[in-house]
Image: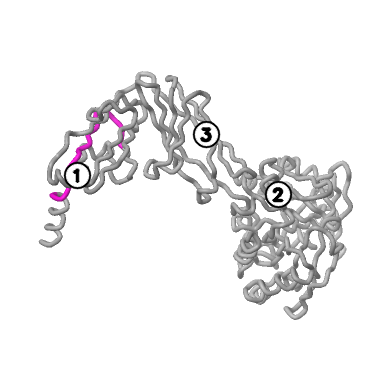
């Protein structure tokens, strides 16, 4: 204990002190991140050792403005010190005159608003800054915080900044905005979100057909919603949150007959559309309600592209009506022919939902595309792992998109079957084998019980490997 006290005392003595004081309500933030003085801690002794190179920024609290420094030799609105370590060492144990930041209350509080827009194609965030009650002559933006000493400056209205997001990790970041008019200065911390494309910045420049997507077989049939003999444990919103970007969904009219010659949903309007698999008595959900969950996801995740592959027993007109009712049509993408767009282009255009169905299309709804015109698949009826084959099943193997079916078919969904085929090295080896066989990428890696095994991580790894 005595040794620790002696070391602390030596550190204080072997340094000089440059106190920081605050008048009014605000904080002093330093470029080093080590010389800060918060209002709650004022005054601050601010011990300095070695080179003293720091820039201080005064950040007023809400309803206050910064009015000036004392002890800063006329610098404003920021205050910088560049004192070599030799000078600091020569003043060991001494105290320099204090640096004081003065804040005054504003009768008409100044506010800063920031509007951000993101380009997935350019990998940029544009931040437009508006300031009320004062007319700034300078606005500074610190995208990575003051401690990183990276600031963008705009000296004329309108104040706008474009930031390269490649230097950021994906996720939320706090930036600092400081506006000054020559007499007062105001600041605000703002949260910006740096997004990738389907969760990865390197996928933004890849074409839709150059990306692999974790895909769920009979995605609507899940134990969370109480379906009997389900194919998934997770409900659709949780699948999407988990990273699934391809959904295989079956849709039936209530009045259709199932394989046992029974009405699918007795007592309902026969034209009402439901999500269900083969026998609706085993589990069902109104189509419009299921689609609305996808709308909610796309609304909340503007950096994601999702694909639906329908096994459809209803008319295109009823499918389209359900999309309209779920406010989902706005996101649909139409591919006429030729080269597919990049994920970044689809995201910037906000056409982030690709919809396929296995029945003939209606030209009235061109975004509802016939899947076998664009894709081919491997067999979907393997009963054991040994039954898997890379041979093409439905669709022409020269089509752009490859649906790789990796589930075992039984009467009902089987977690134990998923345990056999969803783990590596089996899964990754099989994907590599079939991609080599067809000399093309397995775009839709389709599984039962996506929460079992390595599907998501394997798809991510293969997408990452393809980017090099």
Q: Earlier in the sequence, mark 3 or mark 1?
A: 1
Residue pointed to by mark 3: 161
Q: Earlier in the sequence, mark 2 or mark 3?
A: 3
Q: Are marks 2 and 3 in contact (CB under 8 Å)?
A: no
Asked if residue 145 lies left or right of residue 402, the reply is left
Asked if residue 313 lies left or right of residue 435, the reply is right
Asked if residue 127 lies left or right of residue 203, the reply is left
Residue pointed to by mark 2: 342
Splitting the image into 4 quarters, where does residue 245 fall?
bottom right
Splitting the image into 4 quarters, where does residue 4 fall?
bottom left
Residue 233 x, y percent position in the rendering: 63, 64
Q: What's the magenta region? A: 13-28
Classify mark 3: helix, strand or loop.
strand
Residue 382, placed above or below residue 94: below
Residue pointed to by mark 1: 88
Residue 218, placed above or below residue 69: below
Residue neighbourhood size for the residue with mark 3, other residues' Cα within 10 Å, grouped as few (<14), some (14–19), many (≥20) = some
Residue 76 x, y percent position in the rendering: 32, 27
Splitting the image into 4 quarters, where does residue 1 fall?
bottom left
Residue 126 x, y percent position in the rendering: 56, 36
Q: Earlier in the sequence, mark 1 or mark 2?
A: 1
Residue 98 x, y percent position in the rendering: 19, 34
């Amino acid at each position: 204990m005595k040794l620790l006290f002696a070391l602390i005392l030596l550190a204080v003595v072997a340094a000089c002190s440059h106190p920081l004081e605050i008048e009014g309500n605000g904080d002093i933030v330093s470029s080093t991140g080590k010389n800060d003085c918060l209002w709650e801690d004022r005054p601050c002794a601010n011990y300095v050792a070695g080179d003293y190179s720091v820039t201080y920024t005064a950040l007023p609290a809400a309803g206050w403005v910064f009015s000036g420094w004392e002890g800063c030799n006329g610098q404003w609105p920021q205050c910088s010190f560049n004192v070599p370590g030799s000078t600091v060492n020569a003043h060991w144990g001494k105290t320099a005159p204090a640096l004081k930041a003065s804040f005054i209350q504003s009768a008409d509080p100044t506010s800063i608003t920031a509007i951000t827009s993101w380009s997935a194609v350019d990998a940029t965030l544009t931040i437009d800054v508006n300031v009320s009650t004062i007319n700034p002559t300078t606005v500074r933006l610190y995208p990575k915080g003051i401690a990183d000493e990276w600031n963008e400056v705009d000296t004329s209205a309108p104040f706008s900044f474009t930031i390269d997001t490649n230097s950021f990790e994906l996720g939320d970041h706090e930036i600092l905005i400081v506006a000054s008019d020559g007499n007062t200065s105001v600041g605000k911390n703002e949260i910006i979100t740096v997004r990738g494309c389907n969760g990865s910045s390197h996928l933004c420049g890849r074409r839709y057909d150059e990306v692999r997507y974790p895909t769920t077989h009979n995605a609507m049939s899940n134990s969370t919603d109480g379906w009997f003999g389900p194919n998934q444990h997770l409900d659709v919103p949780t699948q999407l949150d988990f990273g699934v970007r391809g959904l295989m969904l079956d849709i039936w009219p209530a009045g259709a007959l199932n394989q046992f010659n029974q009405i699918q949903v007795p007592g309902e309007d026969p034209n009402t559309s439901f999500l269900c698999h083969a026998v609706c008595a085993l589990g069902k959900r109104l189509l419009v309600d299921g689609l609305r969950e996808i709308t909610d996801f796309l609304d909340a995740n503007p950096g994601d592209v999702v694909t639906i592959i329908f096994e459809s027993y209803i008319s295109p007109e009823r499918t389209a009506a359900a999309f309209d009712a779920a406010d989902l049509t706005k996101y649909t993408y139409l591919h006429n022919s030729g080269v597919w767009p990049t994920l970044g282009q689809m995201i910037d255009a906000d056409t982030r939902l690709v919809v396929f169905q296995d029945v003939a299309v209606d030209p009235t709804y061109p975004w509802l595309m016939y899947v076998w015109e664009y894709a081919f698949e491997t067999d979907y009826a393997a009963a054991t792992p040994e039954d898997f084959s890379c041979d093409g099943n439905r669709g022409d193997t020269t089509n752009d998109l490859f649906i790789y079916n990796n589930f075992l078919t039984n009467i009902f969904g089987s977690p134990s079957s998923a345990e056999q085929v969803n783990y590596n090295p089996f899964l990754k080896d099989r994907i590599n084998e079939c991609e080599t066989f067809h000399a093309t990428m397995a775009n839709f890696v389709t599984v039962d019980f996506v929460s079992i095994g390595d599907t998501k991580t394997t798809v991510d790894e293969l997408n990452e490997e393809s980017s090099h």
